Image (cartoon, grey):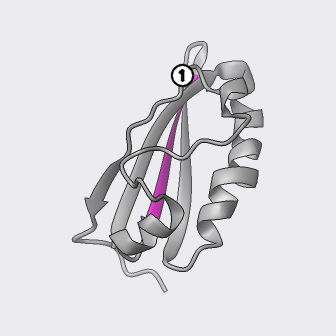
Amino acid sequence: MIARIWHGWTPAEKADDYVDYLKRTGVEEQTSLAGNRGDFVLRRLEGDRAHFIVLSLWESMDAVRAFSAEPDEAVFYPEDKDYLLELTPGIEHYEIVVAPSIP
C-alpha cells in the first residue's frame, strides 16, 4: 500500500471553510477511484495559519496514477488559490510496510 502526502497552509480564519472545500473536491474525487483505500485530512492551528496534511492511501502507484498522471505533483482545483497561502506543488509517497489490521 502507498501513502500519498501533501502539505498546505491557509489563513486560520479560512480553516473550517477549507475543510468543507477539501471534502467536495480532492477527497471526494480520490475516494471515488478504484484503488483508493481512504483519505485523512489533518489540521493544526499555528497562530494565524492552519497547517493541513492530506494523507491518502492507495493500493499501488498505478492506482495513484489514475488520480494524477504526474504523481509527484499536487493536484489543484480552481478555488484552491482562494484558500491556500501558496500552491505547494510537492507530494511525498511512502510504501506502507507496517500497518494496523483494519477491516
Task: Determine the residue located farthest toward the bottom in the rendered image.
Answer: 103
Asked which quadrant contains residue 77, the reply is top right
Circle 1 SS class: loop
Rendered position, 11 above or below 79: above
x and y percent of residue 11 in the render? 65, 19
- Would you call the spot at circle 1 few (<14 residues within 10 Å), some (14-19), or many (20 or more)? few
Q: Mark 1 points at which residue?
A: 86
Q: Which of 40 and 66 is in front in this view?
A: 66
Task: Determine the residue located farthest toward the front in the rendered image.
Answer: 69
Task: Determine the residue located farthest toward the left in the rendered image.
Answer: 97
Rendered position, 65 above or below 20: below
- The main secondary structure of the magenta stretch is strand
What residue appears at the point 49 percent right and 86 percent down from the top-left corner?
Answer: 103
x and y percent of residue 60 in the render? 35, 74
Residue 55 magenta: yes
What residue appears at the point 54 percent right and 68 percent down from the top-left corner?
Answer: 38
Q: In this view, does 80 lie to the left or right of 68?
A: right
x and y percent of residue 21 in the render? 75, 43
What residue appears at the point 72 percent right and 25 percent down from the top-left corner?
Answer: 82
Q: Total number of numbered labels?
A: 1
* Type of the residue with mark 1: Glu
Q: In this view, does 81 lie to the left or right of 39?
A: right
Q: Which of 71 and 58 is in front in this view?
A: 71
The magenta segment: 50-57
x and y percent of residue 27 in the render? 64, 57
Asked which quadrant contains residue 29, the reply is bottom right
What residue appears at the point 45 percent right and 59 percent down from the top-left corner?
Answer: 69
Q: Is residue 48 left or right of residue 94?
A: right
Q: In which quarter of the image is the N terminus?
A: bottom left
